[in-house]
Image: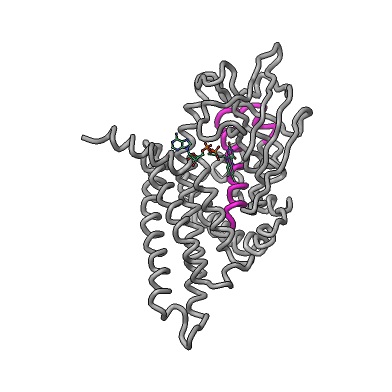
Amino acid sequence: MTQAFLDQVEAFAEKTIVPAASGWSMGAVPDGKIYEKAGQIGILGMQVPQTFGGQGLDFTSRAEACRILAGADFGFAMSLINTHNVALRLSEIAPGALCQRYISDLLSGKISACTALTEPGTGSDFAAVTTRATQTATGWVLNGEKTWIINGRHATLSIVYAQCAAVGDVDGIGAFLVDLNAPNITRYAIDSSFGQTSMGTGGFILRDVEVTQDAMLIAPATAFKAILTEINAARTYVAAMCNGMLARATRDAATYGARRHSFGKPLNAITSWQASLSAAETALKASQARTAQATDLVNTGEDAQLLAAQAKIDAVTAAQTHLPELLQLMGAEGLRSEHVFCRHIAAAQIAGFTDGATNILKDRVDRLITQKGP
Ligand SMILES: Cc1cc2nc3c(=O)[nH]c(=O)nc-3n(C[C@H](O)[C@H](O)[C@H](O)COP(=O)(O)OP(=O)(O)OC[C@H]3O[C@@H](n4cnc5c(N)ncnc54)[C@H](O)[C@@H]3O)c2cc1C
C-alpha cells in the first residue's frame, strides 16, 4: 500500500469531490474535468500494472482508495472504480491490440466504462441473462437490454455479458467488449429520488450490434466462474466504501454535536445523543475489522468467499442502520445538501443491492458456514 497515493486521493476527495457533490445530490452531473483529474492522480489505473500505464498498486490500496472516495460521494466513487475495473480487466485478459486501443483513454479519464450483467428481467439470477450473442463469419451479433448499469449513461465502453447458447446455460455465457457509441445501441438514464447522478446509472438496448471476434473477452464456460471470483474483491471494496461513508457521517455528527447547543449545553453532553453516536462508532469499528480481514484475503489471493460476503453484510447493515440515526442527531441541519447524510443514506440502500443483494449473501454465508462446519 502506498501512503503517498492515498494522501492524493484524500486531497482529491476533500478539495474536489466534496464541494461538487452537494450539486450532484440536487441533480447536477459531474463534468469531464473531474474524471480527468482522477486520471491524473492515478485513481483510474490504481491496480492496473505499470507496463500498461497504471499504478500497479495492490488490492489493499484499491480498497483504501474506495473507502476514502466513498466518504466524499459513494456514487462518484462507484463511477470511477467501474471504469478502473474495465481497464484492469483489459490489461489482464486482453493485453493485445484491444487493450492498447482503449487503455490510455480509460486511465486518463477521457472515456468511462461499465460492466453490464443486469437486465430488466434478471438481476440476482445472473445465469438467466437473455442478451444473446450469435456467432457470424467475422465475429458476433448482440441483441438484448442491460439496465441499472453504473456509468451506463455516459460510458464509451462496456463489458457486456451475453448468452451464446440456450438461456439458463451458465456455461453458455460469454463477455464481450462493446463500444456503446456504435450504431444500433440506444441508451437511457435511470433517475430516481435516490439521486446518484454521480453514479451515471443507466441502461442500453442492443439491436443487431456487430462486434469483431476479438471483442469476446471471456469465452463461454469461463465467464460465470470469472465473475464469481471478481465479485469477492467487489464485495470487499463495497464494504470498505460503506465504512468510509459511516466514518465520515460519524465524524461530521461528532463535530456538529460539539458545536451546536440545545437547552444551554452542547448536543454531545446529552446522554441519549452521545449514546447514538457511540453506537455508530462501535458498529463502525466492528465492520472495519471484518473488512480488514477480507481485504487481506483478497490481497493475498486466498479464498475470500465467506469473509467478503460477511464483510459486505456487516458494512451495509451498519451503514443502513446508523446513517439514519446520525441524520437524526443532526436535526434539520443534516438534511442540507452540503452534508453527506442524505446522499449516504441513499447510497447505503444501493450498496445493499450491488455485487450481491444482502438477503442472498446471508443465505450464501449460511451455506458456506454449514459446509465448513464439523
Ligand atoms: C444504483 C445501482 C447500480 C447498479 N449497477 C450495476 C452495474 O454496474 N452492473 C450490473 O450488471 N448491475 C448493476 N446493478 C444491478 C444490481 O446488481 C442488481 O440490483 C442486483 O443484482 C439485484 O438484482 P435485482 O435488483 O434485479 O433484484 P432481484 O434479483 O429481482 O431481487 C429482488 C429482491 O429479492 C431478493 N432475492 C432474489 N432472489 C433471492 C434468493 N434466491 N434468495 C433470497 N433472496 C432473493 C433480493 O435479495 C432482493 O431483495 C445496479 C443496481 C443499482 C440499484
Q: Quadrant of residue 95?
A: top right
Between residue 50 and residue 215, name the one nearer to us.
215
Instruction: Please say whether residue 295 is one of the residues in the magenta stretch.
Output: no
Residue at the image point whose x is 46% and y is 79% from the top: 267
User: Position of 188 compared to 354: left or right?
Assistant: right
Q: Is residue 45 above or below residue 272?
A: above
Residue at the image point whose x is 51% and y is 19% from the top: 169
Instruction: Please say whether residue 96 is one of the residues in the magenta stretch.
Output: yes
Question: Which residue is situated farthest in the right direction here?
Answer: 183
x, y percentage for residue 325?
Answer: 47, 65
Residue at the image point whose x is 40% and y is 47% from the top: 311
Q: Can residue 217 be seen from the camera position used here?
A: no
Q: Can residue 300 be seen from the camera position used here?
A: yes
Residue at the image point whose x is 40% and y is 37% from the top: 301
Q: Which residues are magenta?
A: 73-102
Q: Quadrant of residue 344?
A: bottom right
Question: Which residue is situated farthest in the left direction here?
Answer: 374
Q: Is residue 313 above or below residue 174?
A: below
